[in-house]
Image (cartoon, coloured by chain):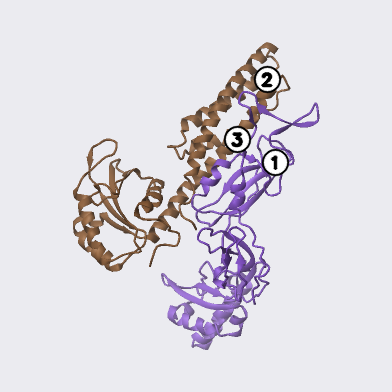
Chain colours: A purple, B brown
Amino acid sequence: MSQTTTAIPAFDHLPEVNALGAAALQRLSDEWLRDPLAKRHGVKQITIKEDRGRTLIGDVAFEVLDDPSSDSLEPYTLHFPVDDLVLYIIERGVADPEVRLRLKQIVRARRERSGEAYQRSKSVAPRRLFIRCKNPQCLRIFETQYTAFPGRKLEGTFEPFACPACGTTNPVLPDDFFPLDCPEEKPVDLKGASGENEKWFSIVIPWRANVFSQIAPLVGRINDAEFEGYSVETVLFLGPQGSSSMPLGRLYFARRDQSFNKVFREETGTWEEVRHLATKKTLYELADFSVLAALKIEPLANEGAEAER
Amino acid sequence: MSFPSSFHYENEADFIRRLIVPVLQRLGFDAVTNYHGTREHGKDLVFGETDRFGHHIYHALQAKYVPSISQKEAFSLIDDAKQAFMMTFQHPTSGVEERISKFYVVNGGSISDNARDLFFQALRPQFGANVRLIDGNEMVALERHASLVIEAGSKFLTQVLRELTDNRASMIQFMESFRSNEPIPEMMLRDDCSTEFLKNPCFEREVDPGKITDYSNSIRRIRDKKSLAGHPFVSQDSRQSIYLEIGDLTNTLLMLGEDIDACIRKALIAAGPLLDP
């Protein structure tokens, strides 16, 4: 189910409808839910509310009727035909035929003048589903191939999955899948000292307790071993992006083909390592990025888990 | 109800040390002193703040880590509250005898309605609204709020850290070119993040804004000297002496940068959420 976010002042220009009161409008709205048009658009629940003498449509709950493949992330548009509901209420709630006619004319005129007054749409997108290893010593989260609309659960039976981190075999129930919010990937402005030809990438990690104690020592360091398929010294850890309001965060990296500790010497046309003679230190310090690799949320390669739809 | 799912503490002391104390510090309370296990007189923790009148006031906190506080257990909490208000405590640094203004009970689990009613009915007539109960769920909400407060600061510090490492690479490159009489590379020293930090300092206990000011000022002095060295009216000898000065400044700046770098990393380690999502 998905709900509208703002109240709809659908009865503001219809004093006789407004005068019916919230209780009567709620009853008529509930009746309208059985109308074929309401069913076609997946409208499941309407909440009428009163606010300082005004009667408004408070919340509208939909059932997403679209049945995309279980791994789709394509958004889906919910449509609420407000005008049809209002005409239904006028037809059944207002006794005087002349008043009914006048009110219907108002609705038609407003619909022609401004379609937005009586048509509401909202786009909802399915969310990626994750699963957690049930071993209390592991509890690692993995990204699955499944997606679901907000409020909707997967159905069916699933094969157990073997945790790639600890090897525990986990039985899987539909309730084990959960969506997680992750900060949007933001483009990185690479204006560092290491020159041009740099590119950036990010990985997703769980934003959990004490995450900073693991990543803070590594900010501004380069990899001392192969990391994410890139060779030694070619990945610079730029820093994290995360918030305790979201369960997932991102780590950003810069990468280039040459070592970050090498500088191009024009006279020889070669890349040469530079060290501070006094301290023997390189431009960037090396660090073990295996901690970051261990934090990364991996896609769960488990072809055996199949949802029955 | 039991404990919130993100609570995995061994016992009351662990709950105090790993959650309550950091949350109070993140919320800006100072002089957080742990009396747990000593002659506490109803006070596991005492913490202070400066009110809007500029007066320093203290609060006491009695922590529990049980799945639920029942009506029976509320009696002992009522005693704790009365003792906490009645008995003075000694300020840990000044040694002055002080009294508390407010008393909090924090439980990792829930607090039954009967226990709440009894607690407030027994204490409100005497202490008014200065007695409070906080359950596990409320503690989770407080942790989220407290983490959001420091998140902006930690984001800033990460940017300063990146600036320090990039500047460091530039400076080493400059120093080694200068030493080996190679063409002096363009030294791209940035101070935008450190300047931004100085406008709105955070983690001041760990990261001294004075050091950041010195760092930022040194970068500006290097920039000025570089600009002077590039001036066509400056003689070759003077230029050489300016570069020597830049070299000295850069060496000092490298050491200062490493000092700040270490402080920031230490500060960042303590940042981040205290609870798993």
Q: Nearer the viewer, residue B261 or A84?
A: B261
The x and y percentages for residue B164 are: 58, 34
Is B151 situated above or below A28? above
Q: Chain of mark 3?
A: B
SS state under label 1 = loop
Compared with A169, B246 (above or below) is above
Q: What chain does badge 1 belong to?
A: A
Q: Residues within 10 Å of mark 2 (few under 14, many from 20)?
A: few
Who is closer to the viewer here, B178 or A226?
A226
Which residue position holds label 3?
A: B165
Q: Please say whether residue A188 is visible from this viewpoint.
A: yes
Question: Against B202, is A305 above or below?
Answer: below
Neighbour class for label 1 at 10 Å: few (<14), some, many (≥20)?
A: many
**Which residue, given by chain and number where applicable, does mark 2 sit on?**
B179
Q: Which of label 3 and label 1 is nearer to you?
A: 1
Mark 3 → mark 2, Cα distance in angstroms? 21 Å
Image quadrant in which you'd find residue A275: top right
x then y, percent, for residue A225: 67, 43
Measured as percent of width and height from the top left, residue A248 is found at 56, 56
- The answer to whether A130 appears left or right of B277 in the picture is right
The residue where tag 1 is placed is: A234
Q: Are marks 2 and 1 on the same chain?
A: no
* Coordinates of residue B128 in the picture (x, y in percent): 23, 56
Q: Nearer the viewer, residue B8 or A80?
A: B8
Tag 1: amino acid: Thr
Name the residue type under label 2. Answer: Arg
Alpha carbons under labels 3 and 1: distance apart: 15 Å
Q: Are marks 3 and 2 in contact (CB under 8 Å)?
A: no
The amino acid marked with disc number 3 is Thr
- Give the residue at x 62% y 72%: A159
Q: Secondary structure at mark 2?
A: helix
